[in-house]
Amino acid sequence: MALARHLSIGEHAGNAGKGIKEMATVPQEIMNSLTAQRPIRDRAAGQVVASLEGVSKNYQEVKALKDVNFAVRGGEVVALLGPNGAGKTTAVKLLLGLLQPNAGSVRVLGGDPTNPENRMRTGAMLQIGRVPETLRVREHIDLFSSYYQDPMPAAEVLAAAGLEKLGDRKFGDLSGGQRQRVLFALAICGNPDLLFLDEPTVGLDVEARRMLWDQIRKLVGCGKTVLLTTHYLQEADALADRVAVINKGQIIAEGTPEDIKAKTAGKRIRCFTSIPLGALRKIPGVTEVKEDRGAVELHTGVAESVVRELLARDAQLSGLEVAAAGLEEAFLALTQEGANGGNPD
Amino acid sequence: MSTATIALSNTRIQRTAAHTVSIYLKEAKYEFLKYLRLRMYTVSVLSFPVMFYVLFGLVLNPHNSIEGTRVPVYLIPSYGTFGVIAASLFATAAGLAADRGLGWLQVKRASPMPPFAYFTAKLFTSFVFSTVVVLSLFALGFAFGGVRLSTVQFWQLLGTLVAGSVPFSAMGLALGYFTGPNSAPPTINLIYLPMSFCSGLWVPFMFLPKVVQKIALVLPAYHLSQLALGVVGSGTHEPALGHWEVLAAFTMICLGVARIGFQRDQEKMYG
């Protein structure tokens, strides 16, 4: 996740003249004191390539984003995870310069997102309802590639998006999943350093989804940065170095997928038992009890002692399952906490 | 594969002029191809003026005259104007409304496309289709209607009509910013069909009721058709400059409205 950039002093001096900012490795204590003075920029763990600082965005009465602070660092995959209407797409559109914030500032690649030179280094895949249908796939890619300085060769783009045999097909003749892949192709064709993907695998079947995930991983391996939004928890888990959970316009949790999972009580115990719910709740270590189609589901951080207690109290207990609380539970717990005004931190 | 450093570069990536020009050309090419392959567009834009001309100019009244001008000659400027209006409006308004409403314009805006390239591409498409309509009418008139234009007249008429696609493309942009994807085509029809009628594009101007003739004075279609008729020595014989002024003012107003729409759009998109 944290890719430290190592540079010798000589390289650093040599590059200084080109105006490129790069960081030598510095002891963590010094970095901490530096970051205390310069809030988001230039941490040792990869530079910030895009950020929302204190951003609020309203649509008439609806507050889509409320005082959001969010940063994307170079070379990582960040997932913005949230339910529909949480503000994910708004955040992406602000970062793409398609919207202006009501408060706060948006910075991309060190500048304003509406800067055309910035756009030559970014690619975007949005959820949209229309692409001109009478143009062929190859033609769409040709046009978008022409906007960039150094685009990928057309054959590579088609291969990367899984569209090899569809180059001459008109967009209107494609299936839903194929159309989605064309939108992905348009996002990557310019060889951008920073990629924004808004719900990229919606409508794709499992195979296409895996293929897209592989492509994203490959791009990150080449040093690109990816911000993806999704409500598929598996996707965030599979791809992201860092996850920011967003709900109702606010970021309610941020960290690696493991960090997020750890925010809920660690394990889930499921069994069929005759012990009443009230008694189950009183077992030390149990944080939550739910009924689920005749079985009960317990959440706890101390699975072993709870299981021992259950087995001791009910000799007829059956169908015992103990599993790690997945990202799904973490997500639901966080969004419900967020909705109730509770701050998990 | 090296862990390439993501340079938070202060160096600006500048496009060369040649690169920018090639983008404009490519955008125009694909916009034109897009409409060329759209049967609904090409058929309706090209066939109606041609059909009307053949019917009213060649089949029904080939030997009649309207105020001294032979009908097959008179109808080229009027149906030509009609064709140019349709070609321009449908190339701009309908496409823009759909692109806006359904998100394609957002993808284009998020890309490094120079925003102006989108609009010039639409203008180019309007020009090309306007030219094709007018040339079709010329060809039919020449082949079957005994229409003979001098070289000067040919170029003047063609130039006037094709130049006329500019105000109507501007009108199309203004409309495109204020209609939705489904309401755009019917709105266009509701505006341009009555406008064409009241401007004397179907029933010649002098046969329209006085009231309608008064209305025509504020309609750009009337002014364009008068300019075109003037080239063949017909029409109401008012000074050309007045007509050009009205068209220029109309274009400016439409571009102003379009610009308002353009700026309004930046705040209007829901996540």
Image (cartoon, rainbow, N blue to C red):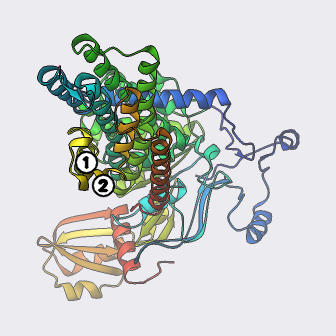
Judging by the rendered image, the residue that carries numbered circle 1 is: B198
Chain ID at mark 1 = B
Whether residue A200 is situated above or below residue A144 in the rendered picture? below
Question: Which x, y percent locates residue B160?
Answer: 44, 31
**Quarter of the figure with residue A297:** bottom left
Which residue is at 42% across, 59% downward?
Answer: A89
Whether residue A213 is situated above or below residue A234 in the rendered picture? above
Q: Is residue A325 left or right of residue A187?
A: left
Of helix, strand and loop, which one carries label 2? helix
In the rendered image, the residue lying farthest to the top is B143
Give the residue type at disc 2: Ile
The label on residue B215 is 2
Chain ID at mark 2 = B
Give the residue type at disc 1: Cys
The reply to whether residue A158 is visible in this rendering is no
In the rendered image, the residue lying farthest to the front is B68
Contact flag, marks 1 and 2 (Cβ < 8 Å): yes
Q: Quadrant of the C terminus of chain B?
A: bottom left
Question: Which x, y percent locates residue B79?
Answer: 27, 31
Whether residue A217 is situated above or below residue A36 in the rendered picture? above
